[in-house]
């Protein structure tokens, strides 16, 4: 008896993965904001039974900061709640809700992630963005004024109308923080994308008032190849703020040194930005 088209398609996907075709695009997954090697995605699992749809598909381990979409029993709206079973207010009517079971360490398939049946918190240069923030169209925000060690996301912080990652900001809260006001459809795309693995925590970047596309780890070879004049060091300084010592310690091949550089590309103008950390 022949295999069903669904089984055949799944086995073909696994075969592509085994042959080390590395990006999600190569594997046929629709993640516009993640262009890096699949191995750089946090919790990547090439196979598993999805906790939400019960289908066997590639996906990710559901973990801390992940949310599951449920239907509010009070107003009927779809709303995200923490996967660890904690209470969260409905984004529409503010009724306290919870999942009723814990799904941490479970498998969430890539299709359910793209469809928003589950989603993932992102740390960004404009502040943390949980799936709840995404639905409300705002970030958690950052301290304001940013001070001497200002994050590059603040623009015209000294003006009467400061912006954060190119977006207008809220009035200061009781702690003096301001949040960026960003359309929900923009933030949904972000929280429905995989997280990337870092030494010291992700720091998703923005450009042209949009989340940037994560390209992956870069070494000196990548910077030299991307620089219009071949001067990779100058590009690393201008785009990722590497200082001279960090550049010297950066390996030729990405990921082979204690210094790691995480690079992004603007989805609109294709400019490069990045950040780096060290083990």
Image (cartoon, grey):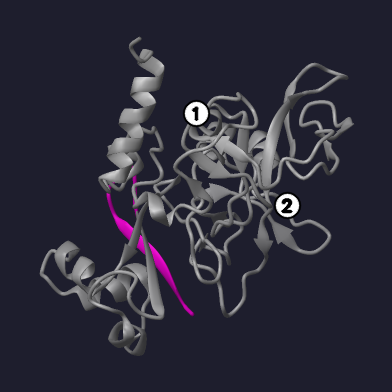
Return the residue nearer the eye: 88 or 160.
88
Residue 27 image label? none
Residue 140 locus on image (x, y percent): 69, 52
- The residues tagged by marks 2 and 1 sit, at their Cα atoms, a distance apart of 37 Å
Category of crowding for the residue at label 2, using alpha-carbon neighbours closer than 10 angstroms: few (below 14), some (14–19), many (at least 20): few
For label 1, the SS is: helix
Q: Residue at x 54, y 25 (%)?
A: 55
The residue labelled by disc 1 is: 111
Left or right of residue 13, residue 62 in this image: right
The residue labelled by disc 2 is: 171
Which image quarter: residue 103? top right
- In the rendered image, residue 251 lying in the magenta stretch gets the answer no
Left or right of residue 199, residue 73 in this image: right
Magenta highlight range: 265-279
Report the quarter where the N terminus lies. Answer: top left
Q: Residue furthest top?
A: 1
- The answer to whether residue 224 is above or below residue 19 is below
Q: Residue at x 66, y 34 (%)?
A: 135
Residue 64 locus on image (x, y percent): 68, 52
For label 2, the SS is: loop
Category of crowding for the residue at label 1, using alpha-carbon neighbours closer than 10 angstroms: few (below 14), some (14–19), many (at least 20): some
Residue 188 locus on image (x, y percent): 56, 35
Which image quarter: residue 161? bottom right
Judge whether residue 3 can be spotted in this image.
yes
């Amino acid at each position: 008896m022949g295999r069903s088209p669904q089984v055949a398609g799944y086995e073909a996907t696994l075969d592509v993965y085994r042959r080390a075709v590395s990006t999600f695009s190569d594997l046929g997954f629709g993640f516009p904001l993640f262009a890096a090697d699949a191995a750089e995605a946090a919790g990547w699992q090439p196979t598993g039974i999805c906790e939400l749809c019960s289908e066997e598909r590639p996906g990710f381990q559901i973990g801390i900061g992940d949310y599951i979409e449920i239907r509010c029993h009070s107003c009927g709206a779809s709303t995200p709640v923490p996967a660890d079973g904690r209470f969260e207010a409905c984004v529409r009517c503010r009724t306290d809700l919870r999942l009723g079971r814990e799904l941490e360490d479970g498998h969430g398939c890539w299709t359910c992630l793209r469809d928003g049946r589950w989603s993932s918190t992102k740390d960004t240069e404009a502040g943390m963005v949980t799936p709840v923030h995404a639905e409300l169209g705002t970030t958690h925000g950052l301290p304001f004024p940013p001070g001497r060690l200002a994050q590059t996301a603040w623009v015209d912080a000294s003006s009467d109308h400061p912006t954060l990652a190119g977006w207008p900001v809220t009035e200061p809260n009781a702690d003096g923080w301001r949040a960026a006001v960003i359309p929900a459809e923009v933030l949904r795309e972000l929280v429905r994308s995989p997280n990337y693995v870092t030494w010291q925590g992700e720091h998703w970047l923005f450009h042209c008032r949009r989340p940037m596309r994560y390209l992956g780890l870069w070494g000196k070879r990548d910077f030299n190849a991307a620089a219009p004049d071949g001067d990779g060091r100058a590009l690393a300084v201008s785009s990722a703020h590497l200082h001279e010592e960090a550049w010297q310690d950066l390996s030729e091949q990405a990921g082979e040194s204690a210094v790691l550089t995480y690079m992004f590309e603007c989805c609109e103008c294709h400019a490069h930005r990045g950040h780096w950390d060290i083990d």
